[in-house]
Amino acid sequence: MNFSFPTTPHSKVIIYISLTLIMSIGLFAIIGYPSIKEIKNLSNKIEEQRSQLEQLYIRGKNIKQTLQQYREIKPTVSNLDNIYIKRGEELKFITTLENTANEQSVDQEPKLVSPPVNSTSNTLQLELTTTTSLNRIIKYIMGLEALDYYINIDTVRLSKASNSASATSVSPNLSTLFLATLYYQP
């Protein structure tokens, strides 16, 4: 088998172009295609990392917002501890009620109704009977509202006091019954 190489210039050009084309395709198949595949993989990985960084940024932003909100409400959190009655400190609460009544010259009879020992309720019922004039009752209620404790007055009953000094008095005494709910610290 004899292979003769063409000698005409036209056929030499065609052979050189064909060989160059075959070599270019071979180089592309060997170098270019794997490189393109690797570039696509890197691009996908970069996109995944960008997405993860964006999620981390959003979480960080949420954490910053949460910390800022916490810093804003932190001073008021200690006040929340004061609005509840601590178990075993009911006497302190009664003393506070008596001080408020003395400031307003109100006669009062407090009665606390504790839940049963095995109860999971955090409430404490208060029955408070007072005797004084209407003006002093209003001031007394304002004094109760000014206390640190959270007192939820459910019922207020006003009636004329049975031991009123005289019917012609400018400011007759009234008997008031307050039914309220107090809360233990959870």
Image (cartoon, rainbow, N blue to C red):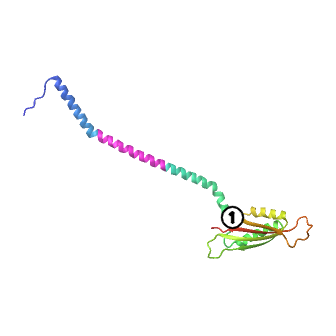
Q: Could you tell me which quadrant the N terminus lies in?
A: top left
Answer whether residue 106 is visible to the viewer in this image: no
Kind of residue at disc 1: Ile
Instruction: Please state if 95 lies on the left or on the right of 184 as rendered.
Output: right
Residue situated furthest bottom in the rendering: 117
Along the line of sight, the residue nearer the viewer: 170 or 114: 170
Residue situated furthest left in the rendering: 1
Instruction: Please state if 30 lies on the left or on the right of 168 as rendered.
Output: left
Instruction: Please state if 37 lies on the left or on the right of 56 as rendered.
Output: left
Determine whether the residue tagged by mark 1 lies in a helix, strand or loop.
helix
Q: Estimate the x, y position of residue 52 in percent, counting from the top left.
A: 45, 49
- The residue under label 1 is 83
Q: Residue 176 sits in which quadrant?
A: bottom right
Q: Estimate the x, y position of residue 155 in percent, counting from the top left.
A: 74, 66
Q: Estimate the x, y position of residue 173 in percent, counting from the top left.
A: 86, 68
Residue 110 part of the magenta segment: no
Q: Estimate the x, y position of residue 135 in percent, counting from the top left.
A: 84, 62
Answer whether residue 115 is visible to the viewer in this image: yes
Most common secondary structure along the magenta stretch: helix
Dot 1 alpha-carbon crowd within 10 angstroms: few under 14, some 14 to 19, many 20 or more: some
Q: Residue at x 32, y 40 (%)?
A: 36
Q: Write the start and end of the magenta stretch as one range.
A: 32-55
99 above or below 42? below
Q: Could you tell me which quadrant the C terminus lies in?
A: bottom right
Q: Residue at x 19, y 27 (%)?
A: 14
Along the line of sight, the residue nearer the viewer: 89 or 168: 168
